[in-house]
Amino acid sequence: MRLLVLGGTHFLGRHVVTAALERGHDVATFTRGVSGAPPDGARALHGDRDDPDALPRALEGWAPELVIDTSCQTRAAARNAAAVFSGARGPRVTGYAFVSSLNAYRDWPPGPIGREDAEPVWESDDDEYGPIKADAERILAAAVGGGFLTARAGLIVGPSDPIHRLGWWLERIARGGRVVVPDALAQPIALVDARDLAAWLVGMAEEGRSGAVNSTGPAGMTTLGGLLEVCREVTGGEAQWVPVAEERLVEAGVQPWVHLPLWLPRAVARTAWDVDTTRARELGLPSRPLRETVADTWAWLRTHDRPPLPPMAHLGEPGLPPELEARLLA
């Protein structure tokens, strides 16, 4: 089938393109053309999603049957795609899988999050990530109708990840020595491998599935400490954990999730990854072994130049600045 990836040159989008090509689809990507080429075998269409004329112009002569949307960051982008795929300015599609976020929920973080239809989502017009994603879901669902699935993703990791949260831990642990860690290694964490999510999204579009799905790893799959231990095993680094109390980290100016990637303050961490993924599991979203994800990410880091942080990475470069680490270790 003709499958369009809105995005397709960064991280999750690249894995979607690869999965779609492996399943025999005729694949095109639609990007601004500034972040590199898609994987070999996909045709590259270019344009700015915020321009209402760009997408219909790019699709002239090539009408997709399926869409996987990994790149919607604005309400204008959602409205423009909706105008095309409602049939008003282009083809109707039989399956449209939209990558949203757990941030679309009004109460996440900290959660917990139950079944998708029981949790409130943002309904404000605030120009922030969560409300924008929630609005985009509504705009696109109303236009596409049946066959529209919204994947509310959580923490996505794996090879080709430009955000570099897991990557930073791998590189720091590989260097060895005394490593600052929060004294919260038992806090739960859940994640999904981008390759698992990508292949599943293609399958959901093929089947014309609809509705919202909490698309992350199962609750209780690991802890922060368990993840870091796997990083130490995979890299072979002789790292020694130096646990630092949350109060001291905050006092020193350490930013949760940024300076110590994947760490959340205890008040948030208790429930942030308590997310009901029953529907995702029923629909076949896999969860490969954590060690495989970590090992493949480490192998990719050692053989590829890391891509630049994408514009949506508004929190900034992840990792503990060396001078701040030195003060904490002292």
Image: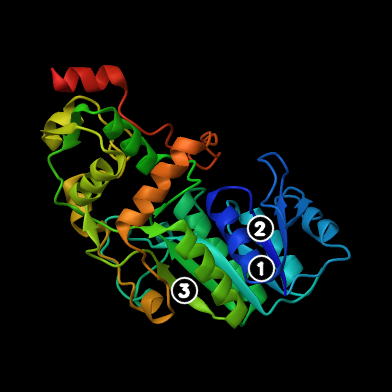
Residue 173 x, y percent position in the rendering: 27, 34
Disc with the residue nearer the chain's start (1 vs 3): 1
Q: Tell me the amino acid under the disc marked 3.
A: Ala
Residue that badge 3 annotates: 212
Q: Residue at x 61, y 55 (%)?
A: 75
Mark whose residue sits in front, 3 or 2? 2
Name of the residue lying farthest toward the right:
61
- State left or right for residue 79 relative to residue 254: right
Mark whose residue sits in front, 1 or 3? 1
Residue that badge 2 annotates: 6
Q: Tell me the amino acid under the disc marked 2.
A: Leu
Q: Tell me the amino acid under the disc marked 1.
A: Val
Q: Quadrant of residue 140?
A: bottom right
Q: Residue at x 46, y 74 (%)?
A: 212
- State left or right for residue 80 relative to residue 236: right
Q: Secondary structure at mark 3?
A: strand
Residue 220 x, y percent position in the rendering: 22, 64
- State left or right for residue 89 relative to residue 36: right
Q: Residue at x 75, y 70 (%)?
A: 64
**Of the pair 280 and 316, the residue shown nearer to us:** 280
Does 182 appear above or below 322? Answer: below
Disc with the residue nearer the chain's start (3 vs 2): 2
Q: Residue at x 34, y 64 (%)?
A: 217
Q: Are marks 1 and 2 in contact (CB under 8 Å)?
A: yes
**Of the pair 94 and 16, the residue shown nearer to us:** 16
Camera sees residue 314: no
Disc 1 residue crowd, few under 14, some 14–19, many 20+, Cα 10 Å: many
